[in-house]
Amino acid sequence: MGTTKRIANRLAGVLCWVSAWAGTAAYAVNDLPGGPAVNQLNLAPPVTRIAEEQHFLHWMMLIVCTVIFIGVFGVMFYSIWHHRKSRGAKAANFHESVTVELIWTVIPFVIVILMALPATKVLVAQKDTTNADLTIKTTGYQWKWGYDYLQGEGEGLSFISTLDSSHRQMSNSGDVSQAPDDYLLKVDYPLVVPVGKKVRIITTANDVIHSFMVPAFGIKQDAIPGFVRDTWFRADKVGDYYGQCAELCGKEHAYMPIHVKVLSAPEYTQWVQVQTQKAAALLDDPAKVWVLPALLARGEKVYAGNCAACHQANGKGAGPIKPLDGSAIVKDADHTRQLQVVLHGAVNGAMPSWKQLSDTDLAAVVSYTKNAWSNQTGQLVQPAEVLAQRTK
């Protein structure tokens, strides 16, 4: 009886796997230019000189190791077969051979040196971040990326890049039958850089260890809280290129994509001009007094882009994520506690800090939560209140 039950359980498991595979195979999946390809086995197609060198090293060392493997095991198996006892072979009785010792010491040493020289050259080049045309600080957050243009054309621009909300909703629903080729790689604000320019990436993190990786560029650099590290790339081809956080950074790790858009020099200049104008328009005076309708409209957009992924669009939360709809902290007429949670986070980072948002954005999103769904408190939080809480 027990054996029959085990067989039935195994058959059920196999059927579930086959059903899942068949369901996945039914969806149309295409290559994503600049991103993953269907049945991809090799490294991503390179668009930087460093990535090309990495490809060469990969194949060169693979071929060398394969030749050595075939040679060593070929000689070994030939010797075993040719000198087997059934053919009358007798074991030789001899001591060490200086010639053999020298051969199997010198030849591997030469091979290692010949492999190490080009590898060292590429490694040194990867770390040479001097004379960059553009310097961008990349900050990892749970679970998004912050980009600050520090030097070069576009200096002063700053924004947060988050997974597109429609892709997150699609993932939450479990229905990916209509998933696009860039599923879970599309972001609201991609990192934009010019083609043919050396871009230095300075990495750090705000909470836990993240890792900035774009395979087509041949870069992967950890972003560690309290530390500043750097890497660089020079894209030789315009287009869209994708990567992901490559360090397990928490439950939303799978929803932390990287999208780099490489533009021609004139297009990049035009993009910088447009973004500079937008940044100037959004530069709010924290002393400005807002009316509730205008603040709620802005707060709804901030909530959708930053909060809905965890707390859901209906404010009900999910699993360990606490609901905002009906929350005593949210409905409290004393705004202090909610502002402190939003500014500094809570529950050991499960609720991340949002101090990177502006005072007006934070005031707007807090006001929105106080008046959305069933809350309807009529309370209004002004940017000046947020500014006052930042220093506490």
Image (tube, rainbow, N blue to C red):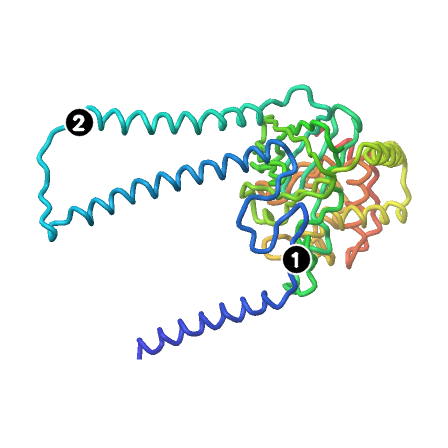
Whole-percent x and y of residue 223? 59, 33
Query: According to the image, label 2 marks what residue?
Result: 97
- Asked if residue 46 lies left or right of residue 273, the reply is left
Question: Which sits in the foreground, 142 or 235?
Answer: 235
Question: Residue 166, position in %: x, y?
Answer: 73, 56
Q: Quadrant of the C terminus?
A: top right
Q: Amino acid at mark 2?
A: Ser
Image position of 169 with respect to 356: above or below: below
Residue visible at 39% across and 76% down? 8
In the visual, does 16 lie left or right of 275?
left
Extreme top residue here?
131
Give the distance between the C-alpha atoms of the residues marked 2 and 1, in whole angstroms: 59 Å
Q: Which residue is mark 1?
A: 30
Helix, strand or loop at mark 1: loop
Query: Which of 18/329 is in front?
Result: 18
Write down the quadrant of residue 357 in the picture.
Answer: top right
Q: Which is more N-terminal, label 1 or label 2?
A: 1
Question: What's the residue at 69%, 27% (across, down)?
Answer: 198
Give the number of the disc on residue 342: none
